[in-house]
Image (tube, rainbow, N blue to C red):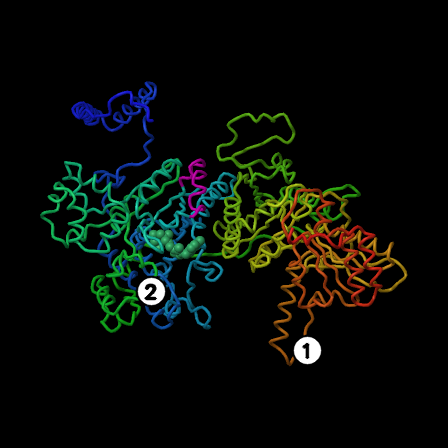
């Protein structure tokens, strides 16, 4: 049963119209400001009186900027249209001809066709390539609009005809173009990889914040620089696209502008067939505190809206759903007259003097330079927060029968007739035959079009996109900088995490590069014992600290500062990774070689934000990912969702990521120092993933001569003691499990008289990569003397089976199988984690010292080097249950 309404809900039309009239009078006499105040007061009073006032996050389905507030277009509209047409043609021809030649090579023609005006207004009037000697605006392009960006660069003379003709033919020893924005593949052109949907928007948000961070810390001067992110409307479905938008408003990022290309379609069909994506995004972004500018209708709608005294046109605009709007542009003018205007007599009358053709050409806002220019101008001038421009466009605009169809996204080629029509419609001066072949067309350099285009870019400081890297970054500090880490802990039990934090503190104090360090944590600093760093360098807070922290009188209080150095991201690994990307590519984008250290729960790293890490590699990102509380058994207690036993394998697939699983703090020092040298001094485009643990044990002093082994991935740490010249077995240990290997060595020696050598294996990934490179060389040079991989050279003279144990799955040591497979016994933590302590976890996963020792004896027995019965008995003696369930299935 519904409660009876208190009052009758029958509207009193007379009363409503009196109130409206009164309101109109106030606005007319005292201005819109007073009107707004009045409404505010009224809604306050309504709330007090218990009247429910619905929260209004939507405005009507019309342009945000009223016509009377528009400024005239500053450019030569005709000339810009000519240029845009040439770009449209070349973009389309590029894809078309390639697919004609090489069926299935792919590419997109319909995304750029909807985006062209949005980009061209930017290129001609807004995108600064520089601000004086400072870098200019950053533009995140919709990835699959790349043909349009290439086509413009072709007209600018920056890309050769040969290059454009080799779009998506990158492997033919000719200059070519990559499918999408990839700095890895075109390092002098693209800055930001965006084609994995959602990564562009989140990266842009954190880029804008990082820009402010650099400014507030005095590392770059303040400039009017903006970050423009062009996003597909379908793309906004990705959690990353909208997941961080409140950060942008919270941080008042008025250097950030999102432009959503609302062509109402994604790949399969309409984005919101039954709703309106523009209205949905308006509410979401307005609710999140953004400045929202809707650009729905083109200028030729203005007279109609002005004549809409009945309000029925507005009503019709509001009630139509996107599925209908899409159909209107897939059909023709007669259809629009009948289905859109024909619904009401008032709207029918509005267009009775217009031809079907005129109705057909009623333009959408995002395709009208006048409307787009005004929106951009407002966005650039807006202060105090980020702006989103929701621009309504048409997918496949101008592609004739391919326009606004559900299958438009996949369109790669046009029919001969469609090509001819395109050339005619956009006035491209090439013969029919050339049109049908999809020939590129570039007017001469001294043509008015190219002169205009060049002049505009000169005015805006140069070409875009373009990526540059300074000649020199910095010299790495010498290893002695970390002498404290090299000396060991003098018997004190510490974890590698603690050791690393001490190193960071040293690095932060470094007079040359300390200020370049960017520690990034997703609400996990206390887990890693980093509170001391809070105090040392402060947490970045753009507004400073507006409150007195309750722990202010404590030594390690929560210190927030406007020039704080730590990026405390809150609980967002994706956001943190986006910060890592901004900081790790700052050497190029800002010419400031910041050094990010992103410290996170290793379980929530590669498997959670792996795609962002992949894009980081594409961005040629530098820096350190620190996988905290690593290891499936070392992170005790936390269980299945927390205990990481596989991230080194996930890391191994990223080509520029060097991953390490060090056991001792001195190993970390060697790796970090060499990493700084290679990334910043030698300018290698690579980054590091280093496992950190929270198990405390004494850290030894660095033995002599192990540096090369640490970096290459393995060195003999502790040879067998005793009379026998040679040991019978090699024990490989990594990370905390090295301690288990050392204990196993002792058990084998003391209980079974089996001498074993112990190796610290810091990186199976690096060992494998080097071995693969050597093997490839050998394969390609059968007539030459073969070379030997490092792992085999290192093992020379060390006999017997290799028992390799780590806190990760067996696939980690298995990486060496092609070279030492016959000798290799991998032990690891395959299977789901459990909540228990380390002792029980290691027993469960069969990687404790006892399991390692028993595995060694078992293997020696199989090799005929140890009595099989004794080996079987050893399992019992050592408490290793041979009949328990396989942990991989447990
Ligand atoms: C993460 C991810 N998932 C899927 C794709 C494949 N994909 C490429 S374009 C596209 C549709 C894009 O639609 P929209 O964002 O609306 O852009 P439009 O082309 O309409 O401008 C899809 C699904 C992708 N590139 N990235
Ligand atoms: Mg779309």
Picture quadrant where residue 635 is located? top right
Q: CA distance from mark 2 to mark 1?
A: 50 Å
Q: Which residues are the magenta region? A: 238-254
Q: Position of residue 411 (x, y in %)?
A: 32, 62
In the picture of the structure, the residue carrying the numbered disc 1 is: 785
Q: Is residue 69 visible?
A: yes
Q: Which residue is situated farthest in the left direction here?
A: 353
Q: Which residue is situated farthest in the front direction here?
A: 1
Q: Is residue 462 visible?
A: no
Give the mark, 2 or 1, whose residue is nearer the N terminus: 2
**Within 8 Å: ligand 1 and the Cβ of disc 2?**
no
Q: Is residue 722 left or right of residue 375?
A: right
| Front residue of this view, candidates 326 and 125 | 326
Magenta stretch: includes residue 244: yes
Picture quadrant where residue 864 is located? bottom right
In the picture of the structure, the residue carrying the numbered disc 2 is: 412
Q: Position of residue 8 (x, y in %)?
A: 24, 22
| Front residue of this view, candidates 472 and 86 | 86
Secondary structure of residue under mark 1: loop
Q: Position of residue 41 (x, y in %)?
A: 30, 22
């Amino acid at each position: 049963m519904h409660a009876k309404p208190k009052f009758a809900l029958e509207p009193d039309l007379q009363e409503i119209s009196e109130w409206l009239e009164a309101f109109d009078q106030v606005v007319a006499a005292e201005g819109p400001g007073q009107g707004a105040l009045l409404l505010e007061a009224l809604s306050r009073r309504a709330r007090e009186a218990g009247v429910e006032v619905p929260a209004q996050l939507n405005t009507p389905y019309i342009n945000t900027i009223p016509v009377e507030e528009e400024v005239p277009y500053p450019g030569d509209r005709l000339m810009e249209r000519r240029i845009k047409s040439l770009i449209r043609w070349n973009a389309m021809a590029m894809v078309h001809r390639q697919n004609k030649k090489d069926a299935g090579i792919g590419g997109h023609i319909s995304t750029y066709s909807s985006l062209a005006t949005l980009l061209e207004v930017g290129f001609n009037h807004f995108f600064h390539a520089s601000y004086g000697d400072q870098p200019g605006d950053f533009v995140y392009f919709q990835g699959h609009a790349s043909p349009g960006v290439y086509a413009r660069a072709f007209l600018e003379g920056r890309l050769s005809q040969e290059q454009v003709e080799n779009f998506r033919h990158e492997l033919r020893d000719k200059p070519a173009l990559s499918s999408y924005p990839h700095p890895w593949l075109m390092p002098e052109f693209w800055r930001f990889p965006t084609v994995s949907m959602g990564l562009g928007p989140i990266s842009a948000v954190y880029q804008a914040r990082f820009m402010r961070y650099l400014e507030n810390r005095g590392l770059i001067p303040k400039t009017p620089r903006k970050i423009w992110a062009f996003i597909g409307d379908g793309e906004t479905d990705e959690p990353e696209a909208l997941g961080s938008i409140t950060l942008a408003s919270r941080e008042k990022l008025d250097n950030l502008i999102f432009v959503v290309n609302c062509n109402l379609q994604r790949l399969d069909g309409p984005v919101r067939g039954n709703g309106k994506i523009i209205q949905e995004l308006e509410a979401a972004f307005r609710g999140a505190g953004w400045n929202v500018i809707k650009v729905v209708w083109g200028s030729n709608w203005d007279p109609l809206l002005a004549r809409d005294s009945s309000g029925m046109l507005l009503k019709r605009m509001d009630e139509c759903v996107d599925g209908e709007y899409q159909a209107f542009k897939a059909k023709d003018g007669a259809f629009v007259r009948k289905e859109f205007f024909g619904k009401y007599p008032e709207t029918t009358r509005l267009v009775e003097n217009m031809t079907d053709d005129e109705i057909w050409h009623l333009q959408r806002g995002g395709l009208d330079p006048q409307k787009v220019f005004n929106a951009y101008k407002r966005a650039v001038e807006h202060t105090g927060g980020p702006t989103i421009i929701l621009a309504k466009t048409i997918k496949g605009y101008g592609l004739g029968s391919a326009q606004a169809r559900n299958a438009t996204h996949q369109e790669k080629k046009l029919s001969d007739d469609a090509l001819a029509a395109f050339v005619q419609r956009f006035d491209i001066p090439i013969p029919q035959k050339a049109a049908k072949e999809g020939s590129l067309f570039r007017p001469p350099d001294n043509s008015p079009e190219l002169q205009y285009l060049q002049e505009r870019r000169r005015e805006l400081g140069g070409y875009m996109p373009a990526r540059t890297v300074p000649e020199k970054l910095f010299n790495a500090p010498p290893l002695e900088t970390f002498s404290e880490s090299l000396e060991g802990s003098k018997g004190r039990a510490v974890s590698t995490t603690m050791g690393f934090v001490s190193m960071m503190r040293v690095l932060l104090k470094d007079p040359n590069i300390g200020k370049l360090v960017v520690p990034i944590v997703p609400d996990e600093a206390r887990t890693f014992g980093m509170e001391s760093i809070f105090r040392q360098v402060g947490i970045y807070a753009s507004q400073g600290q507006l409150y007195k922290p309750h722990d202010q009188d404590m030594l390690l209080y929560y210190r927030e500062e406007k020039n704080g150095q730590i990026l405390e991201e809150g609980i967002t690994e994706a956001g943190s990774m986006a910060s890592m990307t901004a900081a790790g590519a700052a050497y190029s984008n800002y010419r400031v070689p910041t050094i990010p250290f992103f410290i996170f729960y290793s379980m929530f790293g590669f498997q959670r934000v792996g795609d962002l890490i992949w894009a980081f590699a594409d961005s040629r990102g530098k820096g350190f990912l620190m996988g905290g509380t690593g290891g499936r058994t070392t992170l005790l207690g936390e269980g299945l969702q927390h205990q990481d036993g596989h991230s080194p394998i996930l890391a191994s697939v990223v080509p520029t990521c060097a991953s390490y699983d060090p056991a001792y703090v001195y190993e970390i020092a060697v790796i970090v120092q060499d990493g700084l040298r290679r990334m910043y001094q030698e300018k290698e485009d690579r980054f590091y993933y280093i496992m950190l643990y929270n198990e405390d044990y004494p850290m030894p002093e660095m033995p002599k001569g192990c540096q090369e082994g640490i970096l290459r991935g393995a060195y003999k740490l502790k040879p067998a003691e005793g009379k026998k010249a040679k040991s019978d077995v090699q024990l490989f240990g990594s990370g905390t499990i090295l301690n288990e290997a050392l204990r196993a060595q002792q058990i084998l020696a003391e209980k079974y008289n089996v001498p074993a050598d112990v190796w610290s294996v810091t990186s199976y990934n690096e060992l494998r990569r080097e071995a693969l490179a050597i093997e490839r060389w050998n394969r390609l040079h059968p007539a030459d003397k073969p070379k030997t991989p490092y792992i085999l050279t290192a093992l020379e003279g060390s006999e017997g089976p290799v028992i390799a144990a780590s806190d990760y799955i067996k696939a980690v040591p298995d990486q060496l199988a092609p070279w030492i497979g016959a000798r290799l016994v991998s032990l690891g933590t395959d299977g789901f984690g459990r909540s228990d302590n380390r002792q029980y976890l290691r027993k469960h996963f069969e990687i404790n010292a006892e399991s390692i020792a028993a595995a060694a004896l078992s293997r020696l027995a199989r090799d005929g080097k140890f009595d099989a019965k004794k080996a079987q008995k050893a399992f019992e003696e050592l408490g290793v249950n041979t009949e328990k369930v396989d942990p991989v299935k447990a």
